[in-house]
Image (cartoon, coloured by chain):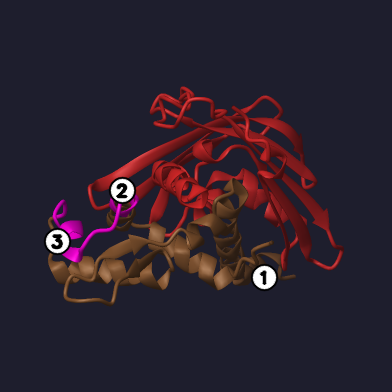
Chain colours: A red, B brown
């Protein structure tokens, strides 16, 4: 079932960076740069493979320290639009260690959740060495990388919230 | 009624959730109230350690600990969770944090860039 509010289910963030657009583009498209900023605190990015061209594949491996030892999560997808220093669009899905997309149920998510999200980044050269960047991430919670470890706990808790509201 | 989401509060909520023990405590409380002793049972942790986790959850507004008697049962407070119940609001802080790191990373690159572009 699609959430009736799914049209609102997107993160849109606008930021202006004090750096030229060429560098901001590199931060998104060159693995060594990407690894440096993408992972959350307590996580490392052992691998980020990016074939940056339309139809090119993308595979990002994230390793997170947990009390039970390091946990690896992999995200795979394709570049849909590549317009250097202007616009970058790619898809993202959870994947197994071979890079095969995991369905929502295989990834431990409830049935009916789409397996793919989409990230759009728009770059604007402000002409004074600064760059405006607008990032839009649209998709469904359970399949979102950052939601990963939290997704199941959230599902359980969301059900409880609903139950409490019903009282 | 539109809930205004306080950024600091949201950050605190996410920080509290970014720990598997605390998520397990919340999952247990989702089934009903429990004392600290009951909450400690499944874990190989001391009571003070569990109490610390509960304090973090309490500060994040996720858990309320009763004041009565020596049992002080904990209950789940759904309010904070409601604030982050849409996917976008759950995920936004993740991206914000990434872009903060991007900013820091750019600052770190700056001297190097200057050296490269020095004429």
Residue B45 marker: 3
- Distance CA(mark 3)–CA(mark 2): 21 Å
Query: Residue A143 placed where, x, y %?
Result: 51, 36
Badge 3 vs badge 2, beta-carbon distance below 8 Å: no
Q: Earlier in the sequence, mark 3 or mark 1?
A: 3
Q: Which residue is mark 1?
A: B114
Query: Residue A49 placed where, x, y %?
Result: 52, 36
User: Which chain is mark 2 on?
Assistant: B
Q: Which residues are magenta?
A: B27-43
Badge 3: residue crowd in 10 Å (few <14, some 14–19, many ≥20): few
Query: Residue B82 placed where, x, y %?
Result: 53, 56
Badge 2: residue crowd in 10 Å (few <14, some 14–19, many ≥20): few
Q: Quadrant of the C terminus of chain B?
A: bottom right
Say left or right for B1 vs B21. Answer: right
Q: Which residue is mark 2?
A: B31
- Distance CA(mark 3)–CA(mark 1): 51 Å
């Amino acid at each position: 079932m699609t959430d009736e509010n799914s049209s609102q289910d997107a993160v849109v963030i606008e930021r202006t960076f004090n750096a030229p657009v060429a560098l901001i583009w590199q931060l998104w498209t060159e693995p060594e740069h990407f690894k440096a900023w993408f992972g959350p605190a307590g996580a490392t990015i052992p691998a980020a493979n990016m074939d940056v061209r339309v139809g090119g594949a993308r595979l990002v491996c994230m390793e997170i320290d947990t009390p039970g030892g390091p946990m690896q999560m992999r995200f795979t997808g394709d570049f849909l639009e590549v317009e250097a220093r202007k616009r970058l669009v790619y898809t993202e899905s959870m994947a197994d260690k071979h890079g095969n997309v995991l369905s929502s149920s295989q990834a431990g998510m409830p049935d009916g959740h789409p397996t793919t999200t989409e990230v759009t980044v728009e770059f604007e050269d402000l002409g004074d060495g600064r760059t405006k960047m607008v990032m839009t991430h649209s998709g469904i919670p359970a399949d979102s990388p950052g939601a990963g470890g939290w997704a199941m706990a959230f599902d359980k808790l969301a059900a409880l919230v609903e139950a409490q509201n019903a009282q | 009624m539109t809930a205004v989401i306080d950024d600091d509060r949201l950050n605190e909520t996410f920080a509290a959730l970014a720990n598997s023990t605390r998520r397990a405590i919340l999952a247990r409380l989702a089934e009903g109230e429990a004392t600290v002793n009951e909450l400690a049972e499944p874990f190989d942790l001391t009571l003070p350690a569990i109490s610390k986790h509960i304090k973090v959850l309490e500060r994040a507004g996720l858990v309320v600990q009763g004041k009565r008697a020596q049992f002080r049962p904990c209950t789940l407070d759904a309010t904070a969770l409601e604030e982050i119940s849409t996917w976008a609001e759950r995920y936004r802080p993740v991206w914000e944090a990434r872009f903060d790191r991007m900013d820091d990373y750019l600052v770190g690159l700056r001297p190097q860039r200057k050296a490269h572009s020095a004429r």
